[in-house]
Structure formats: structure tokens, C-alpha cells
Image (tube, rainbow, N blue to C red):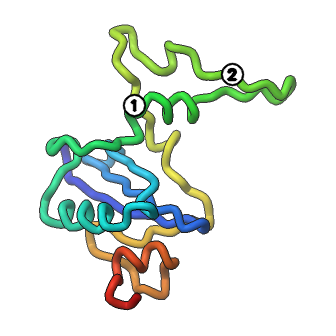
Amino acid sequence: MGKQTWQVTENNGGGLTLYVWHGGELVFAHAGYEYTTDNLRGDSENLKNGGDPIVDGWEGNDLTNEEIIRGIRRHYDNETGREELAGEDEINDADGNIIPLTQEEYYDEHESTKVICDQDGPVAEDEMGAAGSSVFYPEAK
């Protein structure tokens, strides 16, 4: 499996996403924690204490959510301006199992998105937005 690492990002709209890697491979990702900050606080504590979302069977893995996969793997034809949903062969393997999203497909690398916490702890409160500080510095609010 390899070493588990993780991080929480915050985008410029206050969106909070948790990413977990096993040995450098992205295995769990969940967006939308800005709506459930207590869940993110608990999940972060769980990870700090050795929890593993795959082994422990956490719900909400966006990498294996068929609706999210379809949306991300949507094809856009620049010449016709037509959008098409990804075909079944891009969603499921030959045995019918869902093909999880990869880091390249899912990870938000936009310049305005910042890592606000990882396995070493949160960044300083003044380096994150309101959503992140409400999770990692709740006493300041």
C-alpha cells in the first residue's frame, strides 16, 4: 500500500476538498466539506490518528462516484461545440467495474486553490479563507 499522505485544499469560492494518497496514488477524494465542516474536522482527526478511508470504508469517495466520473470524463468537441457523455467503456472496465478517476482527472491545481492542511497539520489561520479557518481554528470564530 505504501505511506498514506493527505491534504485539504480550499479554493477561492471556499470549497474544501480532502485528498488521500497511498504510496503516491490518489485513492480517496471528497469535495463539499464547506457544507459539513464538522465532518472534515472529524475526518482530519481520524487521519491524524491513523485512520484509512479505504480500509475503514468511508463513504463519499468522489473517485468512484459514477455520476461524478461521467461528468468529468465528458468529451467536448471544439469544432461543433457539442458535449457528449463519456461512453460505458470509459466508465466501466470489461468486467463492469467502475474505473476510478485518476489524480490527473480530479485534483484541483488551479492557482487560486491552496493546500490548507496535510498530515503535518494546518497552515496558519491567516493563510486560509473563512471556510478553512472555521474547520481548523474554530475557537477563533
Element at badge 1?
loop
Foreground residue among 17 and 34:
34
Crowding at label 1, few (<14), some or many (≥20) Cα neighbours within 10 Å?
many
Q: Which amino acid does label 2 sit on?
A: Glu
In the image, residue 48 lies at what x, y percent? 19, 66
What residue is rendered at 36% in x and 74% in y?
135
Q: Where is residue 60 in the image (x, y as percent from the top left)?
A: 34, 43
Residue for badge 1? 100
Question: For this rendering, which residue is in front, 140 or 22?
Answer: 140
Left or right of 63, for residue 27? left
Taking the view exactly as shown, the residue that stands out farthest to the right is: 79
Q: Quadrant of the N terminus?
A: top left
Nearer to me, 52 or 26: 52
Amino acid, disc 1: Pro
Q: Name the residue under label 2.
A: 84
- In which quadrant is the C terminus drawn? bottom left
Report which quarter residue 97 is drawn in. top left
Residue drawn at point x = 24 percent, y = 64 percent: 42
Residue 82 bears which disc, if any?
none
Q: Is residue 25 visible?
A: no
Name the residue: 44% across, 35% down: 101
Label tally: 2
At which x and y percent is residue 115? 45, 68
Question: Which image quadrant for residue 93?
Answer: top left
Instruction: Tell me which label, 1 or 2, sits earlier in the chain.
Output: 2
The answer to which quarter of the image holds residue 54 is: top left
Residue reaching furthest top?
Answer: 94
